[in-house]
Image: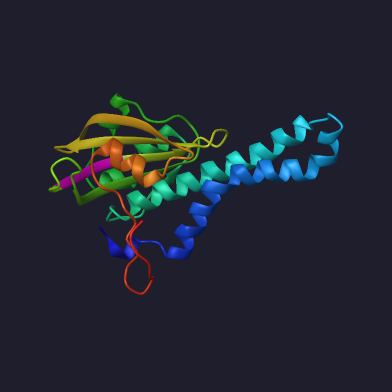
Amino acid sequence: MYIEHAPSPVTFGALLVVYYFSIPLAIIAWYWRSYNYIRKGRFMLRRLFLYLLIGVLLTSLASYKMVSIYFYIHSPADGETCMSPSCISSSPLLKEYHVKASSLKSLGVPSAGPMTLYWVYDTGINTTLELPTLMKYVVVVRPLLLVPSTEVSVYYVSGGRAVLRKKFYVTWPFMPGGVLTRELGVRFTVLMPPGKGGPGV
């Protein structure tokens, strides 16, 4: 774990609040604003749709940021933001860590949209054996925006090539760290370093 990449508890806590409460608060706000109409049998569904759309958008972005944090603290380098598959294929991050871009392309890369590429290289604790295990992945994290979910593509790297792609989704209201732990078989926590305060999450 690269401690210098750990977030402050305020930042991570704020993301948790946005992630868990944006959708419920959107429904509460709709009900509060529309109560007098609802009493008369008018449910203001267009307003409900708009409020839910905002809530879902915020939830998706918060999920994306939290998932990115989990991978960033296991990455020796900053993530790289891309908007297209060609950006991923030509990423300096792949060249720096000697990963053949063609091997990612052969396994498929996410389509257009905001996404962040990470090189994950660290030791984690295997959830089955409770022993240290090497994490050596290229990861692409992409918010889905119109649904409260984040797409995660993990490319396992061996000999400078991506040899396997595992794609899954972190979907509200499941805790992002719990989903990553279950899907990848390695414990994912956010450890707040000394000076930032707070335990791991």
**Residue at 35% over, 40% down:** 179
**Residue at 29% over, 30% down:** 166
Q: Is residue 61 left or right of residue 81?
A: right
Please state, as top left, top right, bottom left or bottom right, where the C terminus lies in the image. Answer: bottom left
Q: Is residue 33 left or right of residue 158?
A: right
In front here: 59 or 64?
Answer: 59
Please state, as top left, top right, bottom left or bottom right, where the N terminus lies in the image. Answer: bottom left
In percent of width and height, residue 13 lies at 47, 59
Q: Is residue 33 left or right of residue 13?
A: right
Specify whether residue 100 is in view: no
Q: Quadrant of residue 157?
A: top left
Q: Residue furthest bottom?
A: 195
In percent of width and height, residue 2 lies at 27, 60
Specify whether residue 45 is in view: yes
Q: Is residue 39 left or right of residue 164?
A: right
- Residue range in magenta is 133-138
In front here: 76 or 49?
Answer: 49
In percent of width and height, residue 147 lies at 54, 33
**Residue at 48% over, 64% down:** 10
In percent of width and height, residue 99 lies at 23, 40
**Residue at 76% over, 31% down:** 46
Q: Quadrant of residue 37?
A: top right
* In the rendered image, the vertical position of residue 199 relative to residue 85, given as above or below: below
Q: What colour scheme governs how the chains and residues are painted in the rendered image of this protein?
A: rainbow
